[in-house]
Amino acid sequence: MQASDQIVCRPIGVVRSRFAAPEGMPVQTAGAPQETGRIEVDPAYAAGLRDIEGFEYLIVLTHLHLCRHERLEVVPFLDQASHGVFATRAPARPNRIGLSIVRLEAVDGTVLRFSGNDMVDGTPVLDIKPYVPRFDVRQTERIGWFAQRLDALEAARADGRMA
C-alpha cells in the first residue's frame, strides 16, 4: 500500500448517548451492561436494517471522532504501564476505529435502542454487524496483560489521557 492511498468511509448513522464527553464513560460495553443508548441510522440505509431485530447483540464499528492524537504506545485505561496501541483497545489509534458489542433492545424504524454503551453522544457509526457466537467467540486463556486487569473493568472510566 502506498502512502498516497486513501480509504474513505461514510458514516451510516450516529450514536445518541448520555455521555457528552469521553471522560467518565465506561471503557468497554461489558463493564457497563446497564448503560443505554441509541443509534440513529441515516434513512438512506434503512433497507440495510431489514431482519436486524432477529439478533440479540450487534457489533458496532465507529469513528472515534473526539480522539485527536495518534499514538503507537499508550497507557490504557485498565493499566498503569505503557503498551503498544495494537495490544490495547485504546482510542488513540492510527485510524481511530472503535468496536462495541451492544445488546439490541428495540428497533424503531431507523433507530436502534441498545444497552451496553461505551460511546459518546455524536459518535459516527461506520458499520453494524450481527454478533454470531459461532463466528465471534473463541475460547482462549492467552489474553496478554489484560489477564491481570479484568477485575478493574466495571470501575474503569475514561479520563483525559487519550484526548
Image (cartoon, rainbow, N blue to C red):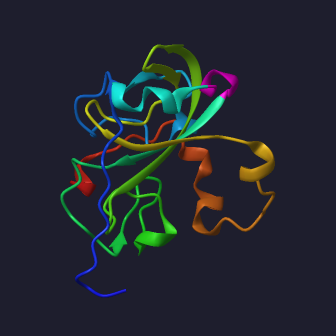
Q: Within the magenta stretch, is there residue 72?
A: no
Q: Is residue 149 visible?
A: yes
129 is higher (above) or lower (below) than 96: above
> 156 left or right of 63?
right
Which image quarter is the C terminus in?
Answer: bottom left
Counting the numbered discs, the total is: 0
> 88 left or right of 140?
left
Q: Within the magenta stretch, is there residue 55?
A: yes
User: Where is residue 116 drawn, in percent x and y?
Assistant: 53, 29
Q: Residue at x 61, y 50 (%)?
A: 150
User: Where is residue 134 drawn, in percent x and y?
Assistant: 81, 48
Q: Residue at x 63, y 21 (%)?
A: 53
User: Where is residue 19 drawn, in percent x and y?
Assistant: 29, 28
User: Where is residue 63 drawn, in percent x and y?
Assistant: 32, 49
* Quarter occupied by residue 105: top right
Q: Nearer the viewer, residue 41 or 124?
A: 41
93 is higher (above) or lower (below) than 37: below
Q: Nearer the viewer, residue 129 or 26?
A: 129
Q: Residue at x 32, y 55 (%)?
A: 9
Q: Residue at x 73, y 42 (%)?
A: 132
Q: Nearer the viewer, residue 160 or 45?
A: 45
Magenta range: 51-56
* Quarter occupied by residue 1: bottom left
> 47 left or right of 68?
right
57 is higher (above) or lower (below) than 6: above
61 is higher (above) or lower (below) than 92: above
